[in-house]
Amino acid sequence: MGSINTSLLQRPRYLKTHDYHCLLQHILPVAIIGLATEEVQDVVWSLGTLLRWVCSKEIHVEEIPRMKVLAAEVVCKLEKAFPPSFFDCQVHLLVHLVDEVAIAGPVHCRWMYWLERYMAVLKGYIRNRARVEGSMATGYLAEESMFFCSNILATIDSACPQVWMEERDEEEDRLTGATKTRMLSSMEFSQLTTFMLNNNIVMEEWRIFYENAKSMSGRSRIFPKFHTYMKEKLVEMDDLLAQGKTISHFPEVTDDVRTIVHGPLRVVTTRSAIWTQGRHFRYRKFLFFVWHINSSLYSKHFL
């Protein structure tokens, strides 16, 4: 007996009521073939047939009388095949299952398996065993609230202004946030100047004049950049004017053109955020610290 694996003789674990129901209806009648007497096989098969009919989704009225007889026969066969200690009120209720189907309809519309499963979910909400019902109610309310909030937040663009924010005109561009004064670097100055030269409508005639001069020179690769070219032309035009010569072959030079060519001020005032087209953009300066083995410190700024 010591060589027998007793784990195979133990009761199945982690099964729910519906799992036992499925075992009795479909698996057990086939599993006991050749393992039990013909009398036990017959009663288990008849019991499985009765329960499959009771749990079916379609019930034919003409079959109800026949199933009443089968239910009584199943109880009688159980009394013959099993000892009296096997019987209790639950076994006797088999006789009344068919009557309940005739009165209330298919059983799958009335059974409580899903409620039993949901009770396991409610038990997981318990944090205070002295107040079980209160813990369940609080946990259920918290889960429902988080579910609805997550559905609402999933449809909201976080960059757009919300009803709880200050109302602003969507067409208005406005700088906000902390104010800071600093010097522009050489790269920033060059980038800002190039951007104004290439995108300002005031420079449209000069951009066309520059492209024509570049294409006629035949040396586009070594032709000066637009910013350098404009500075040279302004100096040339000032010299011509000083000599009393005409400059009609050049596009018009206004004060705006001279201001753009000279570039922005070196000292600028910066802000940390901007409202534009109904969206709020913020400048965030992240400082990441990476510790190396030799205890040196490396930092890098990201926009």
Image (tube, grey):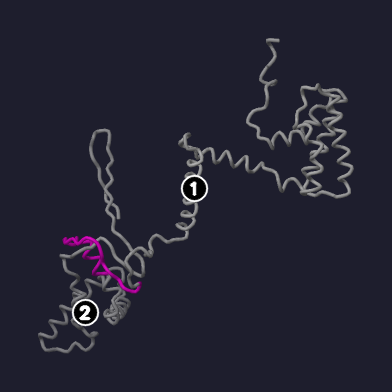
Q: Position of residue 214 (x, y in %)?
A: 30, 76
Q: Based on the picture, tell me whether residue 102 belongs to the magenta stretch.
A: no
Q: Count the numbered circles shown.
A: 2
The residue sitting at the top extreme is 2
Residue nearer the viewer, 103 or 266: 103
Cα–Cα span, label 1 and label 2: 63 Å
Residue of label 2: 257
Q: Nearer the viewer, residue 284 or 101?
A: 101
Q: Looking at the figure, which quarter contains the N terminus?
A: top right
Kind of residue at disc 1: Glu
Dot 1 falls on a residue whose secondary structure is helix
Relative vertical location of residue 61 with respect to residue 238 in this rendering, above or below = above
Query: Where does residue 70 sit, x and y in percent of width and height?
Result: 87, 37
Residue 81's x, y, as percent? 84, 24
Residue in the picture at 79% in, 40% down: 97
* Quadrant (top left/top right/bottom left/bottom right) for the C terminus: bottom left
Residue at figure coordinates x 19%, y 70% from the top left = 264
Residue extending furthest toward the front: 89
Q: Which residue is drawn at 77% across and 22% down?
A: 85
The quarter of the displayed image where residue 113 is located: top right
39 left or right of 108 in image? right
Q: Residue at x 38, y 62 (%)?
A: 159
Q: What amino acid type is highlighted by mark number 2?
A: Val
Cβ atoms under marks 1 and 2 closer than 8 Å: no
Name the secondary structure under disc 2. helix
Q: Mark 1 points at which residue?
A: 143
Q: In this view, does 33 lie to the left or right of 168?
A: right
Q: Position of residue 127 (x, y in %)?
A: 46, 37
> Which is closer to the viewer, label 1 or label 2?
1
- Of labels 1 and 2, earlier in sequence is 1
Region rendered in magenta: 170-194
Q: Which of 67 and 5 is in front in this view?
A: 67
